[in-house]
Image: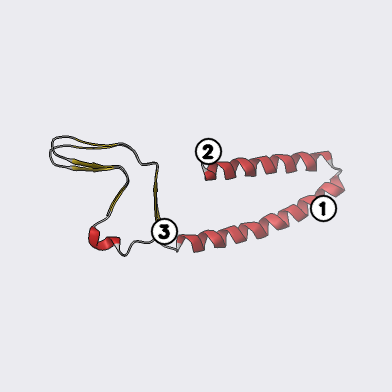
Amino acid sequence: MKRSTMIVVATLGTVAVLALVLWLLDDKRAGQIGGAVSALAGVAAVGVAIWAALRQSSGRIRVAGTGEAMAGSSGAAVSGLSVQSEQSAALPDVNVEETGRAEATGGGQATSGVIL
């Protein structure tokens, strides 16, 4: 299971448990707990937004779950990432995973992964 899917499932589970707890409590106690949870969730949301903004500015490249690539007649098929060699030294952190199948016929070249 992907990390993003696990996060969504955990979030939905937490919300379901919290909803059940609030439903079982009396109105006054549920209001107090609900207010505290709302305040904490708001602070957490601001923190996550700042973290996401800083993370995107780090210059990382992620390539994942690419499809099939086919080439023929001296062509090139890349299912992943291809970077010209003079640019490879300036690459930020690169993560390539779960690339698709690459196939070449008739003198072509095929790569499933990274070409630098």
* SS at badge 1: helix
Residue, x 63% and y 44% (percent of image)? 11
Q: CA distance from mark 2 to mark 3?
A: 22 Å
Please give the residue where the numbered disc 2 appears in the rendered image.
Answer: 1
Q: Residues within 10 Å of mark 2 (few under 14, many from 20)?
A: few
Q: Position of residue 95 (x, y in %)?
A: 40, 52
Please give the residue where the numbered disc 3 appears in the rendered image.
Answer: 60
Q: Position of residue 60 (x, y in %)?
A: 41, 58
Viewer-proximal residue, 2 or 41?
Answer: 2
Q: Which mark is residue 72?
A: none
Query: Are circles 1 and 2 on residues that touch, CB within 8 Å?
Result: no
Three-letter code, disc 3? Arg
Viewer-proximal residue, 96 or 35?
Answer: 96
* SS at badge 2: loop
Residue, x 61% and y 60% (percent of image)? 46
Three-letter code, disc 2? Met
Three-letter code, disc 1? Gln
Q: Earlier in the sequence, mark 1 or mark 3?
A: 1
Q: Which mark is residue 32?
A: 1
* SS at badge 3: loop
- Colour setup of the view: secondary structure
Q: Position of residue 116 (x, y in %)?
A: 27, 55
Residue, x 80% and y 51% (percent of image)? 33
Q: CA distance from mark 1 to mark 2?
A: 36 Å
Residue 75 picture quarter = top left
Q: Residues within 10 Å of mark 1 (few under 14, many from 20)?
A: few
Residue, x 83% and y 39% (percent of image)? 24
Query: Are circles 2 and 3 on residues that touch, CB within 8 Å?
Result: no
Q: Is residue 105 above or below residue 54?
A: above
Q: In the rendered view, does 112 fall on the left or right side of 9?
A: left
In this rendering, the label closer to the viewer, 1 or 2: 2
Q: CA distance from mark 1 to mark 3?
A: 42 Å
